[in-house]
Amino acid sequence: MSETKFVQWQVKEGAGILTFKRPPINVINIELLHELASTLEAAAKEKTLRVLVLRSEGKMFSAGVDVADHTADKVNEMISLFDRVCTWLLDFPTPTLAAVQGHALGGGCELALCCDLIVAVENANFGQPEIRLAVVAPIAALRMPALIGYRRAAELLFTGDNVNAAEAASLGLINRAVPADQFESTVNQLVNKLTALSAPALQMCKRAVRLGADCWNLKHLPAMEKLYLTDLMLTEDANEGIASFMEKRAAVWKHK
């Protein structure tokens, strides 16, 4: 087992368990993103892994990326790091499973969406509230339409509304929503099914599934970064949204 300030990594019988530890709500800051990126890069070299399990400690899976890291002096580093982590998850050689024990919001939801499989407790909410701060959710904008269809994805991204795990499962956003007392056993059952299989066969199967699914295509990620950093973050409203959140006041939109 290895452990940094915010990330723990351990391998148990073919399952790699990556836990981020910034309880109670696991806000993702730049330091945590650095640790996640380096841990994922090292974990991808584990040749006998059959599954990577992404989970967290605390009452929420993650409340998202730290708003303080969206400010003009930090946003370039934050977006670059976050995209790097999401790319590592999407391109991870073995199947990945997000075990969502509490709400997954903003960047926390996006990290889960970058995994192949998602199991969540039934009272967990999923959502992208970024629009309420006059910013957007780049990874979700690339992932959601292919996963649940354009119109439902557009509604969630345009409004910032949450869906509970049961609705998320019905939409195809996640695999399973289970009662809290069945969560660990459900995760373990799925992990056990995968660890009983051949590592190279699972890797080839993942590659085959990706060939059939455009939702894995990240060719638009550079354009998305440009939209966020050189278009969105130059607007007065985006900076007002971030400032109003940090100052705990109502935003005053200038619509420019």
Image (cartoon, rainbow, N blue to C red):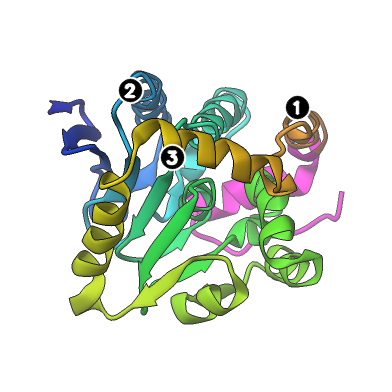
Which amino acid lies under the numbered mark 3 shown in the image of this protein? Leu
| Residue 112 in view | yes
**The quadrant where residue 133 appears:** bottom right
Of 181 and 231, which appears nearest the observer? 181
Is tag 2's residue or tag 1's residue first in the polypeptide sequence? 2
The numbered disc on residue 146 is none
Q: Which residue is mark 1?
A: 222
Q: Is residue 238 magenta?
A: yes
Which amino acid lies under the numbered mark 1 shown in the image of this protein? Pro
Label 3 vs label 1, nearer the camera: 3
Instruction: Measuring from the top left, give residue 145's x and y in whole percent.
Output: 74, 59
The relative height of residue 167 versus residue 226 in the rendered view (above or below) is below
Task: Name the residue at the left extreme.
Answer: 1
Q: Which residue is mark 2?
A: 47
Left/right placement of residue 116 relative to residue 2 reads: right
Few, some or many C-alpha atoms within 10 Å of disc 1 (few <14, some 14-19, many ≥20)? few
Task: Name the residue at the right extreme.
Answer: 256
Which residue is located at x 75 percent, y 49 percent? 237
SS assignment at label 2: loop
Which residue is located at x 29 percent, y 64 percent? 101
Q: Which residues are magenta?
A: 232-256
Which residue is located at x 37 percent, y 47 percent? 27
Of 175 and 114, which appears nearest the observer? 175
Which amino acid lies under the numbered mark 2 shown in the image of this protein? Lys
Q: Which residue is mark 3?
A: 202
Label 2 vs label 1, nearer the camera: 2
Rounded to the nearest whole Å, what is the CA distance between mark 2 and mark 1? 30 Å
Q: Are marks 2 and 1 in contact (CB under 8 Å)?
A: no
**The quadrant where residue 162 appears:** bottom right
Rounded to the nearest whole Å, what is the CA distance between mark 3 and mark 2? 12 Å
Instruction: Measuring from the top left, give residue 24's x and y in whole percent.
Output: 24, 56
